[in-house]
Amino acid sequence: MYFARKENREYKVDEASKKTYLEKGFDIYNDKGEVVERSPLSKITVAEHEKKVADAVAEATKGAVSAEELKAKDDAIAQLTEANKAKDEAVADLKAKLAKAEKELKAAAK
């Protein structure tokens, strides 16, 4: 079962009469009130159009990051990369010292 709505009029329609009502400018809704099919003759208000455009823009820009935020994140990544490089060098230095100490320990144990 469908409903054909136009302005303040609403009619119950079946699948067979849907086309006739669409041709007369009625939009077709299901029993949950959701639009099933819009009439090619139907018009929307400027406010409805602007809301749909605003919703579409909001959806399209959701999660968008500004250039300043990207720069800040790039700077943070560069700092972390440098910090990791310094720590990697420190670890390599400590491993070399450990290897040298183990070698000296073995030599002293002989």
Image (cartoon, rainbow, N blue to C red):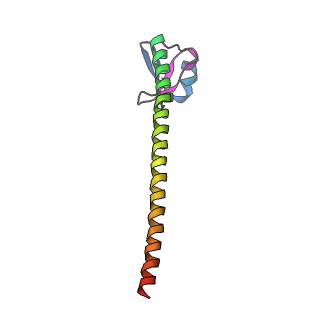
Give the magenta part as a residue range. 22-45
Q: Position of residue 18 (x, y in %)?
A: 54, 24
Question: Which is more toward the observer, 106 or 71?
Answer: 106
Q: Can you name the residue that lies furthest to the front here?
A: 108
Q: Residue at x 45, y 34 (%)?
A: 72
Q: Can you name the residue that lies furthest to the top here?
A: 46
Q: Position of residue 61 (x, y in %)?
A: 49, 28
Q: Is residue 61 magenta?
A: no
Q: Is residue 30 magenta?
A: yes
**Image-based side of 23 in relation to 55, left or right:** right
Q: Position of residue 49 (x, y in %)?
A: 49, 16
Answer above or below: position of 23 versus 80: above
Residue 92 at least partly seen: yes
Question: Which is more toward the observer, 33 or 60?
Answer: 60
Residue 1 at least partly seen: no
Question: Which is more toward the observer, 80 or 43?
Answer: 80
**Quarter of the rendering occupied by the C terminus:** bottom left
Q: Position of residue 51 (x, y in %)?
A: 45, 18
